[in-house]
Image (cartoon, helix red, strand yellow):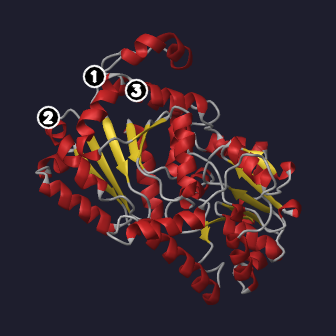
Amino acid sequence: MPFDLIDLVAIEMGYGHLRPAYSLSDFLGEQPILVADAPPLASPEEQKLWEQARVAYELLSRAGRTPIIGPMLAEILQGITSIKPLYPRRDLSPATLATRALMRSAQKGMGRGLAQRLKSDQRTLITTFFGPAVLSEFHGAESIYCIATDSDVNRVWASEDAKNTKITYFAPTDRVRRRLRSYGVPSERIIMSGFPLPHKLVGGPSATFLKQNLKRRLGALDPKGRFLRESREEVGAFLGDLEGGDAVPHLVFAVGGAGAQTELVARFLPSLRKRLVRGKLRLTLVAGIRREVAECFRSVIRQNGLDEELGSGSVAILEATSHREYFQKFDDLLMSADVVWTKPSEVTFYAALGLPLILSSPVGSHETYNKRWAIHSGAAVTQGDPAHAGEWFWEMLKDGTLAGAAWSGYLRMPKFGLYRIIEQVLGREALEARLEATKS
């Protein structure tokens, strides 16, 4: 299938749906990413409907930390995104309030522009958000692929008549596969692919780049050699000879796309200050495209007397002026990162790269499941008291906990989603051609 007959569609609602779209776009030679709520896909009327949904989500995701009314707003978000327990096994296919609300929006015209584009040129849709998939199907489109972006998904990801859906789903986890089946989606419409991680961090089906970065990372994460003493033969079988190292560990703190949990920096930075000044730790604060978040980080850095460290490289802020620039810089950053501290968003899937995660509180039911999945996989730990981060972080380094989490993520989490998706949609020859093209 020619690339120019594919519409790669995402939505600007945080980073969760844009990040996997960027991985696909980058691998396909900067395939354009179309935004569901903007021209040429959405009319002015459709744009208003999308804007209302996005503003409400970002408001609720940031408002949980607001005094007095914060807990109430957090409960509202939890209710909107809630996912029913999967067990006991039962039929979960009946439409929910969110499903019916999406259908009402479809009846008002939401998604009509995209569907008309797909039908007029017999185009194929690949989307990282349920909205374009379900809405396009409602308006008569047929060649539709939808990539789930969490370890479990809400009923709204499937259409009302899920048993007869024309949407083909890519599931990042086996739980998503089972969940979609409980919603009525036929087995033949679900492909267990894994999450589409960036090619530059994986390196193809042989995981060349992943293994190179992991080998370096394990040295930084095991300063006392305790992890290697227990796992040297196992690690050697996969990565070759590896020695414990004295490299300075690099901690990355990444807030969500909506700016959630920015305030954690002010709580943990004082406890890390001594090691940052002594050059025993590197810290990068990821602000993304939000200028106000970057300014907040600079203010906290000044308050803690770390201005010189910000200029010397011990402390850094990652900021960008566009989504594409941000994702490019973030992927480059992860090549040198050793630990990522974040909320359990779509970044949870990056633990498959052998990146141990420190997880803060989830925002929404889907993130609760992401956190559970990562911890059950042994790839993540729950953050301790941020005020004492300098103590518990260092303890987990010395006793090999973070090195063990890196190894578990590499072994247990799916890492080849990008290639499985491309092969399914475009065919084996197209996948091999793109892999060859990335070598030049």
Dot placed on the residue nearer the N-terminal end, 1 or 3: 1
Circle 2: residue type: Arg
**Mark 1 vs mark 3, CA separation in Å:** 16 Å
Query: Under tag 3, what secondary structure?
Result: helix
440 above or below 64? above
Q: Position of residue 346 (x, y in %)?
A: 53, 52
Left/right placement of residue 77 relative to residue 119 reads left
Q: How far across and down, in percent of the image, does residue 255 sit?
A: 39, 56
Q: Position of residue 322 (x, y in %)?
A: 43, 66
User: If the image is split into quadrants, where does the C terminus sit?
Assistant: top right
* Number of the front mark, 3 or 2: 3
Image quadrant occupied by the N terminus: bottom right
Residue ID for mark 2: 278
Vertical side of 345 occupied by 293: above or below: below
Task: Looking at the picture, tell me which residue is in the foreground, 296 or 267.
Answer: 267
Disc 1 target residue: 246
N-term mark: 2 or 1: 1
Work out whether residue 192 or residue 64 is closer to the camera in this orientation and state it: 64
- Residue tagged by mark 3? 401
Q: How dense is the environment of label 1, judged by Cα within 10 Å: few (below 14), some, or many (20 and up)?
A: some
Rendered image quadrant of residue 205: top right
